[in-house]
Amino acid sequence: MATCVRKKQDMPPPGGFQPINTSRIPAKTIFGAKTLIAGHFIFTAGSLYLYYLTHRKVHMEEVERRSSMFAILPMIQAERDRAYLKQLRRNREEERKLMENVDGWVVGTYRGEPIYKTNPPDTLVQPSEQEYYVHSSDKDFRARRYISLWD
Protein backbone atom coordinates (compact mmCIF):
# COMPACT_ATOMS: atom_id res chain seq x y z
CA MET A 1 0.00 0.00 0.00
CA ALA A 2 0.99 3.50 -0.62
CA THR A 3 1.86 5.66 2.29
CA CYS A 4 -0.24 8.78 2.95
CA VAL A 5 1.63 12.01 2.49
CA ARG A 6 0.27 14.85 4.57
CA LYS A 7 0.05 18.16 2.79
CA LYS A 8 1.16 21.25 4.61
CA GLN A 9 -1.58 23.85 4.98
CA ASP A 10 -0.78 27.33 3.68
CA MET A 11 -0.65 29.64 6.68
CA PRO A 12 0.19 33.30 7.19
CA PRO A 13 3.81 34.08 7.96
CA PRO A 14 4.77 34.33 11.59
CA GLY A 15 3.83 37.75 12.92
CA GLY A 16 1.07 38.21 10.25
CA PHE A 17 0.94 40.03 6.92
CA GLN A 18 2.17 43.61 6.47
CA PRO A 19 -0.54 46.29 6.42
CA ILE A 20 -1.96 47.22 2.96
CA ASN A 21 -0.96 50.69 1.75
CA THR A 22 -4.20 52.60 0.99
CA SER A 23 -2.78 56.10 0.97
CA ARG A 24 -3.24 58.26 -2.16
CA ILE A 25 -0.29 58.42 -4.54
CA PRO A 26 -0.59 61.54 -6.73
CA ALA A 27 0.29 61.29 -10.44
CA LYS A 28 3.43 62.97 -11.66
CA THR A 29 2.72 66.24 -13.47
CA ILE A 30 4.42 66.66 -16.84
CA PHE A 31 2.88 70.00 -17.85
CA GLY A 32 1.44 72.68 -15.67
CA ALA A 33 -1.89 74.44 -16.19
CA LYS A 34 -0.38 77.46 -17.95
CA THR A 35 1.55 75.26 -20.36
CA LEU A 36 -1.58 73.25 -21.22
CA ILE A 37 -3.67 76.39 -21.85
CA ALA A 38 -0.93 77.95 -24.00
CA GLY A 39 -0.57 74.69 -25.95
CA HIS A 40 -4.32 74.58 -26.51
CA PHE A 41 -4.38 78.10 -27.97
CA ILE A 42 -1.35 77.44 -30.20
CA PHE A 43 -2.85 74.19 -31.48
CA THR A 44 -6.22 75.87 -32.13
CA ALA A 45 -4.60 78.77 -33.99
CA GLY A 46 -2.61 76.37 -36.18
CA SER A 47 -5.70 74.28 -36.88
CA LEU A 48 -7.72 77.36 -37.86
CA TYR A 49 -4.96 78.46 -40.25
CA LEU A 50 -4.84 75.04 -41.92
CA TYR A 51 -8.66 75.01 -42.10
CA TYR A 52 -8.60 78.42 -43.79
CA LEU A 53 -6.11 77.21 -46.41
CA THR A 54 -8.09 74.03 -47.06
CA HIS A 55 -11.43 75.85 -47.09
CA ARG A 56 -10.18 78.27 -49.71
CA LYS A 57 -8.99 75.40 -51.92
CA VAL A 58 -12.26 73.47 -51.49
CA HIS A 59 -14.26 76.62 -52.27
CA MET A 60 -12.30 77.20 -55.47
CA GLU A 61 -12.85 73.58 -56.55
CA GLU A 62 -16.58 73.91 -55.83
CA VAL A 63 -16.79 77.07 -57.98
CA GLU A 64 -14.95 75.25 -60.77
CA ARG A 65 -17.26 72.23 -60.54
CA ARG A 66 -20.39 74.39 -60.62
CA SER A 67 -19.06 76.42 -63.56
CA SER A 68 -18.33 73.30 -65.58
CA MET A 69 -21.76 71.90 -64.77
CA PHE A 70 -23.46 75.13 -65.87
CA ALA A 71 -21.43 75.06 -69.09
CA ILE A 72 -22.28 71.46 -69.99
CA LEU A 73 -25.91 71.37 -68.77
CA PRO A 74 -27.46 72.82 -71.99
CA MET A 75 -25.66 70.19 -74.05
CA ILE A 76 -26.86 67.38 -71.76
CA GLN A 77 -30.43 68.67 -71.95
CA ALA A 78 -30.21 68.96 -75.75
CA GLU A 79 -28.99 65.35 -76.01
CA ARG A 80 -31.82 64.19 -73.75
CA ASP A 81 -34.38 66.06 -75.87
CA ARG A 82 -32.82 64.63 -79.04
CA ALA A 83 -33.10 61.06 -77.70
CA TYR A 84 -36.71 61.77 -76.69
CA LEU A 85 -37.61 62.99 -80.17
CA LYS A 86 -35.83 60.03 -81.78
CA GLN A 87 -37.94 57.66 -79.67
CA LEU A 88 -41.12 59.51 -80.67
CA ARG A 89 -40.04 59.15 -84.33
CA ARG A 90 -39.43 55.39 -83.81
CA ASN A 91 -42.88 55.04 -82.24
CA ARG A 92 -44.45 56.86 -85.20
CA GLU A 93 -42.59 54.67 -87.71
CA GLU A 94 -43.57 51.54 -85.79
CA GLU A 95 -47.21 52.62 -85.91
CA ARG A 96 -46.91 53.32 -89.64
CA LYS A 97 -45.37 49.87 -90.25
CA LEU A 98 -47.87 48.11 -87.99
CA MET A 99 -50.98 49.70 -89.53
CA GLU A 100 -49.90 49.82 -93.20
CA ASN A 101 -52.40 47.11 -94.19
CA VAL A 102 -55.37 48.88 -92.58
CA ASP A 103 -57.39 50.87 -95.09
CA GLY A 104 -57.94 54.51 -94.23
CA TRP A 105 -55.50 54.56 -91.30
CA VAL A 106 -53.66 57.83 -90.91
CA VAL A 107 -50.72 57.88 -88.50
CA GLY A 108 -51.34 60.15 -85.52
CA THR A 109 -55.14 59.91 -85.70
CA TYR A 110 -57.71 57.76 -84.00
CA ARG A 111 -60.10 56.27 -86.57
CA GLY A 112 -59.38 59.10 -88.96
CA GLU A 113 -59.86 61.96 -86.50
CA PRO A 114 -56.88 63.91 -85.23
CA ILE A 115 -56.22 63.24 -81.56
CA TYR A 116 -55.05 66.77 -80.84
CA LYS A 117 -57.37 69.27 -82.54
CA THR A 118 -56.60 72.44 -80.59
CA ASN A 119 -52.84 72.59 -81.15
CA PRO A 120 -51.16 74.25 -84.14
CA PRO A 121 -49.52 71.74 -86.50
CA ASP A 122 -45.92 72.44 -85.38
CA THR A 123 -46.60 72.09 -81.64
CA LEU A 124 -45.11 69.11 -79.82
CA VAL A 125 -47.63 67.31 -77.66
CA GLN A 126 -46.07 65.37 -74.82
CA PRO A 127 -47.33 61.77 -74.88
CA SER A 128 -48.14 59.91 -71.71
CA GLU A 129 -45.69 57.33 -70.40
CA GLN A 130 -47.82 54.48 -71.73
CA GLU A 131 -47.82 56.06 -75.20
CA TYR A 132 -44.09 56.70 -75.05
CA TYR A 133 -43.28 53.07 -74.14
CA VAL A 134 -46.05 51.55 -76.28
CA HIS A 135 -43.68 49.50 -78.48
CA SER A 136 -41.21 48.67 -75.69
CA SER A 137 -41.21 45.62 -73.49
CA ASP A 138 -43.02 45.67 -70.18
CA LYS A 139 -39.69 45.16 -68.44
CA ASP A 140 -38.31 48.41 -69.91
CA PHE A 141 -41.44 50.32 -68.97
CA ARG A 142 -41.44 49.02 -65.40
CA ALA A 143 -37.70 49.72 -65.04
CA ARG A 144 -38.31 53.38 -65.92
CA ARG A 145 -41.69 53.85 -64.23
CA TYR A 146 -41.22 52.12 -60.91
CA ILE A 147 -38.22 52.36 -58.63
CA SER A 148 -37.10 48.92 -57.61
CA LEU A 149 -35.42 48.47 -54.27
CA TRP A 150 -34.13 44.99 -55.08
CA ASP A 151 -32.37 45.55 -58.43
Image (cartoon, grey):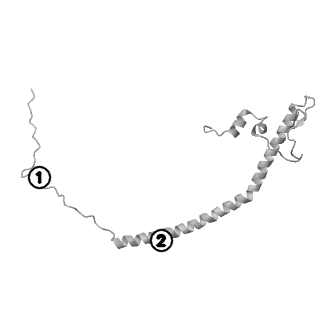
Q: Is residue 77 left or right of residue 107?
A: left
Q: Which residue is drawn at 86% across and 47% down?
A: 123
Secondary structure category for the residue under label 2: helix
Rendering coords of residue 143 (x, y %): 69, 38
Residue type marked 1: Phe
- Using the image as rendered, state which of residue 9 and residue 141 is in the foreground: 141
Picture layout, residue 132 above or below residue 41: above
Q: Which residue lies under the disc numbered 1?
A: 17
Residue type marked 2: Ala
- Using the image as rendered, state which of residue 69 and residue 10 is in the foreground: 69
Rendering coords of residue 17 (x, y %): 11, 52
The span from disc 2 to disc 1 (Cα, nearest Å) is 57 Å
Q: Which residue lies under the disc numbered 2?
A: 45
Secondary structure category for the residue under label 1: loop
Quadrant of the rendering where the N terminus is positioned: top left
- Tell me, for residue 150, which label it has, or none: none
Q: Which of marks 2 and 1 is in front?
A: 2
Picture layout, residue 76 above or below residue 53: above
Q: In this view, does 69 lie to the left or right of 109?
A: left
Q: Residue at x 79, y 46 (%)?
A: 83
Q: Which residue is drawn at 60% across and 63% down?
A: 58
Picture layout, residue 59 above or below residue 95: below
Mark 2 Cα within 10 Å, few/some/many (few <14, many 20+)? few
- Using the image as rendered, state which of residue 62 and residue 84 is in the foreground: 84
Q: Earlier in the sequence, mark 2 or mark 1?
A: 1
Residue 130 sits in which quadrant?
Answer: top right
Rendering coords of residue 106 (x, y %): 91, 35
Rendering coords of residue 8 (x, y %): 9, 40
Picture layout, residue 105 above or below residue 22: above
